[in-house]
Image (spheres, helix red, strand yellow):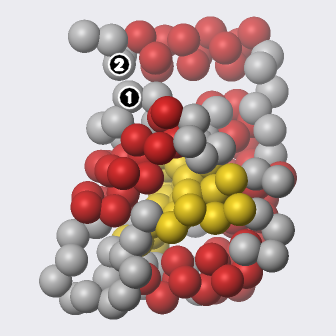
């Protein structure tokens, strides 16, 4: 059973809760918050701990949700070892994992409905990184940017 991390601010809270309920039947879930709706909360407060847990291997993959998904993506990618992307369809969800080792899926809670979100998340979670030489070469170049 994969251990997944979820995080959302107020803009993604409802979608995160729906995904958590759906995913908890199959996966171990670590919820990084928010644990209640608060219109004044800030996505970095939840997405940074999620991202650090992904980078440290405490959870296998992450799902971060804010209103548009843009802020969550930007802050997640500030954490070394995280490869986060805002995804709006299923092809990029699986291709991002297979080719680019995507490890934090970002969604827009105000722009992605629950049924589409489930399809995107399912594609993301079914996918595995290929490890092909061309993808390893590209991943190595990305990782080199993380070094001081």
Can residue 112 be spotted in the picture? Answer: yes
**Which residue is located at x 67 percent, y 14 percent?**
136
Residue on which disc 1 sits? 80
Seen at 33% across and 50% down, the residue is 48
Q: Position of residue 84 (x, y in %)?
A: 48, 45
Residue located farthest toward the left when viewing the structure as drawn: 40
Name the foreground residue: 109 vs 7. 7
Query: Disc 1 to disc 2, how far (Cα)?
Result: 6 Å
Q: Secondary structure at mark 2?
A: loop
Q: Is residue 94 left or right of residue 52?
A: right
Residue in the image at 36% along x and 51% along y: 49
Q: Nearer the viewer, residue 103 or 116?
A: 103
Which residue: 25% across, 10% down? 148
- In the rendered image, which quarter contains the N terminus? bottom right
Q: Is residue 61 above or below residue 98?
A: below
The image quarter containing residue 18 is: bottom right
The disc label shown at residue 49, or none: none
> Residue 14: x, y in percent?
48, 88
Specify whether residue 11 is in view: no
Q: Categorize mark 2 by other alpha carbons within 10 Å: few (<14), some (14-19), many (20+).
A: few
| Residue at disc 1, secondary structure | loop
Q: In which quarter of the view is residue 4 placed?
A: bottom right
Tell me which numbered mark, 1 or 2, is placed earlier along the sequence. 1
Circles 1 and 2: CB atoms closer than 8 Å: yes
Location of residue 33 in the rendering, given as x and y in whole percent from the top left corner: 40, 71
Query: What is the crowding at mark 1: few (fewer than 14 residues within 10 Å), some, or many (at least 20)?
Result: some
What residue is pinned by disc 2?
Answer: 146
């Amino acid at each position: 059973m994969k251990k997944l991390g979820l995080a959302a601010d107020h803009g993604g809270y409802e979608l995160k809760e729906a995904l958590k309920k759906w995913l908890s039947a199959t996966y171990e879930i670590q919820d990084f918050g928010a644990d209640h709706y608060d219109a004044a909360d800030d996505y970095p407060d939840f997405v940074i701990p999620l991202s650090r847990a992904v980078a440290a291997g405490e959870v296998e993959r992450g799902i971060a949700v804010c209103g548009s998904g843009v802020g969550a993506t930007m802050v997640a990618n500030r954490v070394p070892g995280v490869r986060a992307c805002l995804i709006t369809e299923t092809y990029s969800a699986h291709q991002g994992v297979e080719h680019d080792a995507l490890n934090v899926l970002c969604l827009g809670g105000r722009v992605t409905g629950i049924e589409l979100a489930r399809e995107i998340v399912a594609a993301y979670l079914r996918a595995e990184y290929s490890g092909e030489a061309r993808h390893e070469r590209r991943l190595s170049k990305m990782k080199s940017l993380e070094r001081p």
